[in-house]
Image (cartoon, helix red, strand yellow):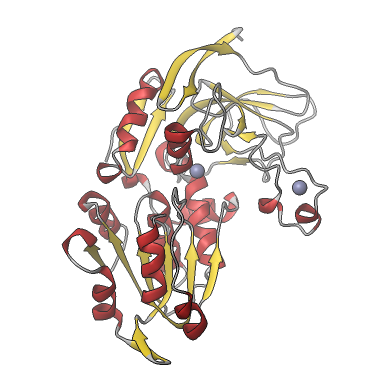
């Protein structure tokens, strides 16, 4: 093994440099993965723009797949060459949230996880500490291609959101914002039995991909009032003193104040709003709609990989077509510049393999 490897390092807001960094050192409980593909996450874009989730010097990237290159002596069931994805989470195991089994709520989660605190996978190699098969390392079935496999993490976010939202067979579902996460919510909702799932965005490219992904109808919010469109599609539901939308479930995946407000208008009385978008600005909320419509409002963050792998392996969720752009690792800065143009992109993949995958 070389002493150094190439990696994309966040040097400050808007600045990424690809350079030589030390090769990760593997302990007896760790594995080293030779990265093939790693997708740029919305959270990576926030960090790139504002330093929101990480500090300068960070190698980001947590949506990846690759092949096992080294295995510590004490690791069971994982062998060199295995095709895998993974994620090291720095949950403390001791706080109240961890004791309740709600590991996603551990306050330490973002201080020492893959791509957040720990070096991530915009690099030739990434280490998974305390590797545990089925927990932080997952073998990939042959039915999941190398591009789709790099989207297992964001697919897991959509699958978990559909569970949090308690999507039921026959439900009428609205998804606000159909980037990667909104698209995953849409497909997960349909896989859970939603009768109709419709999508709103301001990007024709994203709306077209949502349609290809099973959206029953789509609306470009630049062309009119999205709330009125949802009422036309799903009908109008009266409540005390007023009337509003009739959606059983609204996924808010745009992360902007307007769509938060719209979600309260679109949801039916007693329906569910599931908030997965990561906002940069707080929204002003008309709480009358919360009191009189009594929606269930839930937030959803992260998700388990195993159910996402199942959905992709069975074809219930398909994501190969969500990769709109791909770049070699050496062009990571260009890749981020492209992902910033949200209207033109869904998933941008940075590839450390010699064969950069072609967009579908
Ligand atoms: Zn992510
Ligand atoms: Zn904890």
From the viewer's perspective, tell me whether residue 274 is left or right of residue 109: left
Q: 28 or 102: which is nearer to us?
A: 102
Q: Position of residue 132 (x, y in %)?
A: 72, 39
Q: Is residue 68 above or below residue 234?
A: above
Q: Is residue 87 above or below residue 334?
A: below
Quarter of the image that includes the N terminus: top right
Residue 194 seen by the camera: no
**Which of the 4 quarters of the picture holds residue 109?**
top right
Residue 45 seen by the camera: yes
Residue for point 63% across, 40% down: 110
Residue for point 74% across, 33% down: 130
Q: 232 or 85: which is nearer to us?
A: 232
Q: Position of residue 32 (x, y in %)?
A: 63, 24
Quarter of the image that includes the C terminus: top left
Q: 310 or 343: which is nearer to us?
A: 343
Q: Position of residue 89 (x, y in %)?
A: 67, 40
**Which of the 4 quarters of the picture holds residue 235?**
bottom left
Q: How many marks?
A: 0
Determine the residue located farthest toward the top in the rendered image. 3
Residue for point 24% across, 73% down: 229
Q: Position of residue 56 (x, y in %)?
A: 54, 24
Q: Is residue 17 above or below residue 257?
A: above
From the viewer's perspective, tell me whether residue 314 is left or right of residue 96: left
């Amino acid at each position: 093994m070389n002493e150094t490897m190439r990696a994309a390092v966040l040097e400050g807001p808007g600045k990424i440099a690809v350079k030589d960094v030390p090769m990760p050192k593997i302990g007896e409980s760790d594995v080293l993965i030779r990265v093939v593909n790693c997708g740029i996450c919305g959270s990576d874009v926030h960090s790139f723009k504002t330093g929101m989730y990480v500090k300068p010097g960070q190698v980001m990237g947590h949506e990846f797949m690759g092949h096992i290159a080294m295995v510590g002596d004490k690791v069971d069931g994982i062998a060199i060459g295995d095709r895998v994805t993974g994620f090291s989470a720095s949950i403390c195991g001791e706080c109240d949230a961890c004791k309740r089994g709600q590991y996603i709520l551990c306050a330490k989660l973002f201080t020492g996880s893959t791509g957040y605190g720990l070096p991530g996978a915009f690099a030739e190699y990434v280490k998974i500490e305390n590797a545990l098969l089925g927990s932080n390392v997952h073998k990939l079935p042959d039915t999941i291609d190398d591009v789709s496999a790099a989207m297992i993490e964001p697919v897991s976010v959509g699958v978990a959101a559909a569970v949090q939202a308690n999507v039921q067979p026959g439900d009428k579902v609205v998804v606000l914002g159909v980037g990667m996460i909104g698209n995953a919510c849409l497909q997960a909702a349909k896989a859970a039995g939603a009768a109709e799932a419709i999508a709103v965005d301001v990007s024709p490219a994203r709306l077209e991909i949502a349609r290809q992904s099973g959206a029953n109808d789509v609306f470009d919010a630049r062309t009119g009032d999205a709330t009125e469109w949802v009422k036309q599609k799903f009908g109008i539901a009266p409540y005390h003193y007023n009337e509003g939308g009739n959606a059983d479930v609204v996924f808010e995946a745009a992360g902007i104040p307007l769509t938060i407000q719209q979600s309260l208008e679109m949801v039916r009385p007693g329906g569910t709003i599931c908030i997965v978008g990561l906002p940069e600005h707080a929204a002003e909320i008309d709480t009358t709609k919360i009191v009189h419509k009594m929606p269930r409002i839930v937030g959803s963050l992260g998700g388990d990989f195993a159910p996402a792998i199942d959905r992709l392996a069975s074809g219930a969720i398909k994501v190969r077509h969500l990769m709109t752009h791909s770049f070699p690792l050496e062009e990571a800065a260009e890749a981020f510049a492209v992902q910033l143009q949200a209207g033109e992109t869904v998933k941008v993949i940075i590839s450390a393999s010699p064969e950069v995958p072609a967009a579908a």
